[in-house]
Image (cartoon, rainbow, N blue to C red):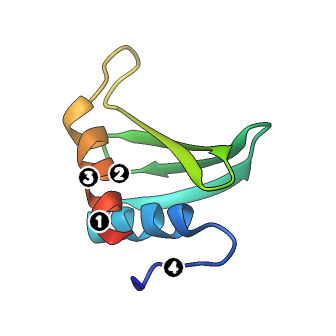
Amino acid sequence: PSFCQSRKSPLRACASAALTRMGIKADSTDKTDSGELIKASTASRRIEIELESTTASATRMRATAKNGAPLYDSPTATEIILRTEKLI
């Protein structure tokens, strides 16, 4: 098993580890109606990672990174997902 395994939420643990490895500070983790929301930030970006349980063995992960009110940073969001996948 990878070092980020957690009995409660292995994907959340791996996403948090990926953020840490990228030098991104996780600010909060909140429960939502459909799962969890991780909020993180850098000096120039606001990041949100949504985790939604779709079945007992599958979780949907969606990452968004913004570097200004109307501007999205797709490469950073994609990199978070790719690094999380490597840690699972």
What is the x, y in percent for residue 88?
39, 69
Which residue has dot 1 on it? Answer: 23
Residue 32 percent across, percent down from the top left: 75, 41
Seen in the image, is 43 located left or right of residue 33? left
Is residue 44 toward the left or the right of residue 46 in the image? left
User: Mark 1 or mark 2, which is nearer the start of the sequence?
Assistant: 1
In the image, 10 versus 36, the foreground residue is 10
The foreground one among 72 and 5 is 5
Residue pointed to by mark 2: 42
Residue at 26% in and 52% down: 82
Percent x, y of residue 5: 51, 79
Quadrant where the N terminus sits is bottom left
Residue under the point 59% across and 78% down: 6
**Helix, strand or loop for disc 2:** loop
Which amino acid is tagged 2? Thr
Marks 4 and 2 in Cβ contact (< 8 Å) = no
Q: Amino acid at mark 4?
A: Gln
Q: Disc 3 to disc 1, how far (Cα)?
A: 15 Å
> What is the crowding at mark 4: few (fewer than 14 residues within 10 Å), some, or many (at least 20)?
some
Q: Which mark is residue 5?
A: 4
Q: Are the residues at dot 2 and dot 1 in contact (C-beta closer than 8 Å)?
A: yes
Q: Secondary structure at mark 4?
A: loop
Nearest-to-viewer mark from 2 and 3 = 3
Amino acid tagged 1: Gly
Determine the CA span between mark 1 and mark 4. 20 Å
The single residue placed furthest to the left in the displayed view is: 75
Bin the neighbour count of mark 3 within 10 Å (Cα to Cα): few under 14, some 14-19, many 20 and up.
few
Residue under pointer 3:
82
Whole-angstrom CA distance, mark 3 to mark 4, is 17 Å
- Mark 3 residue element: helix
Q: Earlier in the sequence, mark 3 or mark 1?
A: 1
